[in-house]
Amino acid sequence: MVAPAEIPQPFESVIDAAPEPVTVEKRRPRRLRLWGGLLAVSILGIGGIVAIASRPDSEAPEVAALPVTVTTLEPVTSYQVSRSYTGEVVAGRSSQLGFERAGTLAALLVDQGDRVEAGQPLARLDIRSLEAQRQQLLAQKAQAQAQLQELQRGPRSEDIAAAQAAVADLEQQLALAQLQRSRREDLYARGAIAREELDQQSFGTAALSSRLDQAKSQLEALQTGTRPEQIAAQAAQVQQIDASLQALAVDIDKSVIRAPFAARVNQRRLDEGTVVASGQAVLDLIETGSLEAQVGVPTEMAEGLRVGDRLAIDIDGSPYQATLTALLPELDPTSRTVTAVLILPSEVSPVVGQTVRLSVAETQSADGFWLPSTALTPAAEGLWSVYVIQPTDSGYTVARRDVEILHTDGERSLVRGTVQVGDRAVISGTQRVVPGQAVVPGSS
């Protein structure tokens, strides 16, 4: 059995002893010792810093060169700016169709939005009165033609024979009358009859003589045939009736509206049963398959355009190539621009009135360098900076060059400033480099 260890007496004396009061004289040496320790630590730290700073350069840690992408600057003397101008799609041809003659609208054969072909009937007027006139003229023509044919054939043999018989009968009657007059003259000379009876017989004889002359003339006319003047007059009457029929046919044809070209019906203005005046619009047509774009461009821009140029346009976000067909000679009174007319490609099917944007490249004179926009970093006073690499004994380092942006075209910018031909500019990772930094260049 191990006996318990005894506590040393000094420890017991420390615990049991009552604490002595601390005086000012006892605290002062402890404070002095504390300040002395702090001073010693400071001296050691300063000494270490001085020792590190006094090392030779060969002992400093080396910083790794940063890989960067560079491009060589090449000068340019001009650049192109894309200008955009707004216009609209228009139909190559559009027409308001109506009738040339007045009448009642009998039928409308199409509706709004319908596609029609050239020559297709679109509307008709009531032509019943014209048809009645036509039948009347046809009857008159038939009568006139029959008379003309009769004149052209000449008199019939029966008519000539009848005329001859009439002449012979009158000759016999005249011979009898002359014989009776001679007898009356003898009787009157002997006083057997009165003067009145002789006069009656003489008058009857003269009348028969006149009738005989007339019958002989008619017989001679029949034997001679129809005169050319009569035939010509009758033929002229037939031609006059033909002309009336042709005029009526024109009126009947004008009673139908036909499409003048392939188109779509844009508006139907009237309905069946309406009494239409001459020239009153009935239908509006817009040509299909020949759409144009009309765009207003400034006069100075129009001077650089030529008929036949292929120009870039945009319709509803889709790019196309259109052909310039005309530059109208008169300025638009509102916009004071020249109207450029472009034929749209066949694969385009826009709506008339749709917006068109025309893009035209304009050349501007300027000396500078093209750089990717990623090579530019902001600088003071609204300027920009470019990092270029400079050769050193151990490689390349970065230097800053101030530049001015002349034009920005998408992902590249045209600049001028303190850069020179042949400089190699950093075009990527510019946010990681600073002037004087060592880099390893790589081509773009």
Image (cartoon, rainbow, N blue to C red):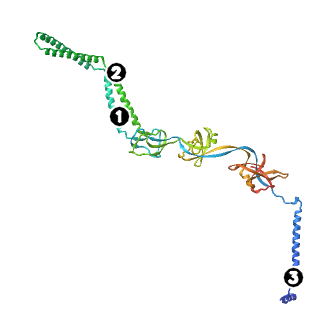
Residue 112: x %, y % from top left: 46, 46
Q: Is residue 327 above or below residue 220?
A: below
Task: Please say whether residue 146 is visible from this viewpoint.
Answer: yes
Q: Around disc 3, counting alpha carbons within 10 Å, would you say few (fewer than 14), some (14 to 19), or many (20 or more)?
A: few
Q: Position of residue 371 (x, y in %)?
A: 73, 49
Q: Nearer the viewer, mark 2 or mark 3?
A: 2
CA–CA distance in space, label 1 to label 3 = 147 Å
Q: Are marks 2 and 3 in contact (CB under 8 Å)?
A: no
Where 325 sits versus 233, above or below?
below
Q: Mark 1 = which residue?
A: 134
CA separation, marks 2 and 3?
169 Å
Q: Kindly identify which residue carries mark 2.
A: 229
Nearest the viewer among 344 and 394 is: 344
Tag 3: amino acid? Arg
Name the residue nearer the viewer: 78 or 317. Answer: 78
In the rendered structure, the answer to whether residue 247 lies left or right of residue 42 reads left
Relative to 349, 393 lies left or right: right
Mark 3 sits on what residue? 27
